[in-house]
Image (cartoon, coloured by chain):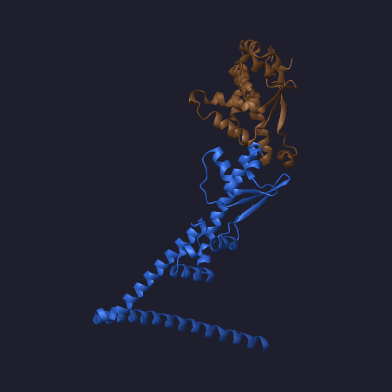
Chain colours: A brown, B blue
């Protein structure tokens, strides 16, 4: 039995659909919708182990990528990595069978620019804040919501890099 | 949440080695917090290992399986709730300890501990738990205080033998002082009784007039 189902968190969504780029006018990513799910304790531990040896300079960025690789479930209602896509990648890059969907997802995320990663990460933070405030039965203190404000700065930083992002993105990954 | 645990729960921890527990519902599951003597971890993974000994879930033999699937914010809430429970536990120990140390059960156990080995009486898993640690400390301090009182009393008893003349003079001064104090008190009492007698007489006189 899925323990999360047994706990049955009514009115406390663990996953939610976001359109994180909706304010990016003129961008091809504008209407993209993503489904994010709150990561579990086991996944958090895996992330902790994965970033343990990272240098401080890149720690935050790598942690965001690792987190999103666990939290992002689909883009435009399609899975991020299909089985065929993974098989093709294994064949073309001659990787071992241990090369998992998660490993491929990490590569997928590393192709994104930091603005895209940040937009997705802030969407995840929104979901987590919403869940935490429902859990506590009261709104979170403002100190914990500071990062949200930065998302607007990220939107204003929107430049031509989005085009590059679109070019870099594997076509199948979007489900389009 | 209750402000304090009961005195019986603290006594159980000291004399039986049974730690207090707290039961609460989490969705459809019943979780049981148990006081653990391990230090609070500093890392996320450390807390995961810590809860293996501190949280039990009805229906699950291995709490790790359960904890691994919890959403991270809920896990942080568990950490917060556990810390709150632990602070209540420590507060309860400090509140009830002076009463517990004076109880007959505690006095007997402490005497037995002194005559035999503490290891045979209250040790749990070859070590003292936090409550037992405080209990031993409290009893030791009290023993020290009793010993100091005993020495002071013996010294008082010896004073006449050490310098009889000096002791007699001190005694006289002390009794003189007390006699003076007694005299003052007597005077005050007499004055009060006198005033009381006067007022009583006036009341009686007044009543007589009214009745007449």
Q: Is residue A26 above or below residue B165?
A: above
The x, y position of residue A29, in whole percent, is: 69, 15
Q: Report the quarter where the C terminus of chain B lies.
A: bottom right
Residue in the foreground of this view, choosing between B139 and A73 = A73
Q: Give the residue at x 57% y 47%.
A: B83
Residue in the foreground of this view, choosing between A113 and A104 = A104
The x, y position of residue A167, in whole percent, is: 65, 10
Q: Is residue B36 above or below residue A45?
A: below
Q: Is residue A82 visible?
A: no
Q: Is residue A81 above or below residue B61?
A: above
Q: Locate residue B137 relative to residue B206 in the image: left or right.
A: left
Please tell me how many numbered marks the rendered image carries.
0
Q: Locate residue B86 relative to residue A135 in the image: left or right.
A: left
Residue in the foreground of this view, choosing between A141 and B161 = B161
Q: Is residue A7 visible?
A: yes
The x, y position of residue B16, in whole percent, is: 56, 62
Q: Give the residue at x 64% y 18%.
A: A90
Q: Locate residue A71 relative to residue B170 in the image: left or right.
A: right
Q: Is residue A11 above or below residue B204?
A: above
Residue in the foreground of this view, choosing between A28 and B50 = B50
Q: Give the residue at x 62% y 50%.
A: B33
The x, y position of residue B26, in whole percent, is: 69, 45
């Amino acid at each position: 039995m899925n323990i999360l189902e047994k706990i049955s968190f009514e009115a406390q969504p663990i996953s939610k659909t976001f359109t994180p780029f909706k304010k990016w006018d003129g961008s091809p990513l504008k209407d993209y919708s993503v489904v994010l799910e709150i990561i579990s304790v086991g996944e958090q531990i895996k992330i902790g182990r994965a970033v343990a040896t990272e240098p401080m300079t890149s720690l935050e960025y790598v942690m965001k990528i690792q987190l999103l690789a666990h939290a992002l479930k689909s883009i435009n209602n399609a899975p991020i990595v299909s089985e065929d896509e993974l098989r093709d990648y294994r064949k073309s890059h001659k990787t071992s069978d241990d090369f998992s969907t998660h490993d491929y997802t990490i590569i997928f995320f590393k192709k994104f620019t930091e603005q895209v990663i940040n937009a997705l990460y802030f969407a995840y933070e929104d979901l987590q804040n919403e869940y935490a405030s429902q859990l506590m039965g009261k709104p979170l203190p403002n100190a914990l919501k500071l990062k949200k404000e930065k998302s607007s700065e990220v939107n204003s930083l929107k430049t031509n890099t989005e085009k590059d992002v679109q070019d870099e993105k594997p076509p199948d990954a979007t489900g389009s | 949440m209750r402000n304090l645990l009961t005195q019986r729960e603290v006594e159980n921890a000291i004399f039986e080695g049974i730690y207090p527990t707290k039961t609460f519902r989490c969705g459809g599951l019943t979780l049981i917090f148990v006081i653990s003597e391990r230090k609070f971890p500093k890392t996320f993974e450390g807390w995961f290992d810590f809860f293996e000994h501190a949280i039990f879930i009805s229906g699950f033999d291995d709490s790790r399986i359960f904890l691994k699937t919890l959403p991270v914010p809920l896990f942080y809430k568990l950490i917060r709730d556990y810390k709150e429970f632990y602070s209540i536990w420590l507060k309860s120990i400090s509140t009830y300890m002076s009463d517990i140390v004076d109880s007959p059960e505690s006095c007997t156990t402490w005497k037995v501990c002194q005559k035999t080995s503490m290891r045979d009486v209250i040790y749990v898993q070859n070590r003292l738990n936090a409550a037992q640690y405080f209990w031993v400390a409290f009893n030791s301090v009290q023993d020290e205080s009793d010993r100091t009182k005993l020495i002071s009393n013996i010294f008082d008893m010896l004073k006449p033998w050490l310098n009889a003349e000096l002791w007699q003079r001190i005694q006289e001064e002390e009794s003189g002082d007390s006699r003076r104090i007694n005299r003052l008190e007597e005077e005050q009492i007499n004055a009060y009784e006198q005033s009381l007698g006067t007022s009583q007489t006036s009341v009686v006189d007044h009543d007589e007039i009214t009745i007449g």
